Amino acid sequence: MIHRAILLASFFMLCYFIQAQSRTDAWLQEYIVEHASPELKDVLNKPDTFQYQFIYTKIDRDSRNNPHLTNYYFNVDRNRYFNPASTVKMPLAFLALQKLNELKIDKETPMLTDSSYDRQTAVRIDSSAATGLPSVAQYIRKIFLVSDNDAYSRLYEFLGQEYINKTLWRMGYKDIRITRRFVPMNEEQNRHTNRIRFLKEDKLIYEQQPQVSHVNFDFSKKIFVGNAHLDRNDSLINAPMEFTTHNNLPLEDLQQILQSVIFPSSVPAAKRFKLTKSDYRFLYQYMSEYPSESSYPRYDTSEYFDSYCKFFFFRDGKIKPPSNIRSFDKSGWSYGFLTESAYIVDFTNKVEFMLSAVIYVNSDGVLNDDKYEYEKIGWPFFREVGNIMYQYELQRKRRYRPKLNQFVLEYK
């Protein structure tokens, strides 16, 4: 007991210093520390090195099965930059469905992309689709199944940089900044988006002319990460890498965006995407489906194993998720940053909760060299903190057990 008291006291001292700069709930920190392995304690004891942030969302149902969500924070700071990588694909998927609804176009409608500006490329076919044609629906499938970069870029082009950012800002996400595709382009090239055409039975039903974004971003706060980096020619630059104009998506906003789609009624109307019941069902399907369960697109499961995009619990060791658990999530990894926001359901034990986290694992401080400690530190971090909170949920007393029928889906 004395050893445990000393251990917790030392971490409460750490908590004091963390809270001076970030948001931490003492209960969550104490619980994780108490159940952490020595390896995880070592990570938690170095918040400046690993720049981790963690949000646990407790979900309590009332007698009518309405969810009531409470967030708990550990070292969360929306002003501490991390590269959001592929997590930005999630709000774009939601926005693409919203825009289609505004245009009254079905998500399966063939969408052809033309080349209209410097470095743009065209898309006229999609061999991964059952129809052989590209569509917003197929791009969203690929985004959630394997985090496909090209699919994200095509949704970026359909939406346009100005629509993306102004819409998210109007929804209250003032700190989000999505400025670029995931292909080598400069700032001006990313402001320009392609001509888009939607066809039905080979007839044009909607045409979107090439667009140029005039949105003004606030780049006054300069952002640098690391000690050195490789440039596009693989030359070592002995200076930090600049992220001032890169995408930005704070962890709190990522969690809120996921929550708004999983539990729309739990957020203010202004923060909800304009989606149909069919859209929600479609999203739940592909946010939780595994690559091995998909026929269109079909994947090589030796490369895209079932836990490829499932960081919490399963990515470490490429564990095959058990049949009773599903994670509705979006993850991302780049430049040494690992991020995921997930709604996790155990249908057998009637357990549900949300987890969101980011960690930075780059011991040599060199960016863009693909030498990061994902396997040694990153994936184990997500596995262990996920398991700690899952074990807590298994023993937590609930007044009303959740009815989870809306998340019970059929997978091929």
Image: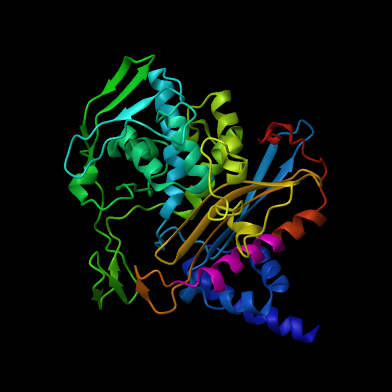
**Residue name at image x 40 percent, y 59 percent:** 83
> Where 295 falls versus 348 (above or below)?
above
**Residue name at image x 62 percent, y 60 percent:** 318
Whether residue 200 is in magenta: the answer is no
| 50 with respect to 301 (left or right) | left
Q: Position of residue 181 (x, y in %)?
A: 31, 47
**Magenta span dominant secondary structure:** helix
Q: Position of residue 182 (x, y in %)?
A: 33, 50
Q: Quadrant of the C terminus?
A: top right
Q: Quadrant of the N terminus?
A: bottom right
Residues 90 and 70: in front is 90
How many marks are shown on the rendered structure? 0
Residues 10 and 154: in front is 154
> Where 68 falls versus 186 (above or below)?
above
Residues 207 and 345: in front is 207
Q: Which residues are magenta?
A: 372-388
Residues 75 and 305: in front is 305
| 274 with respect to 154 (left or right) | right
**Residue name at image x 54 percent, y 52 percent:** 304
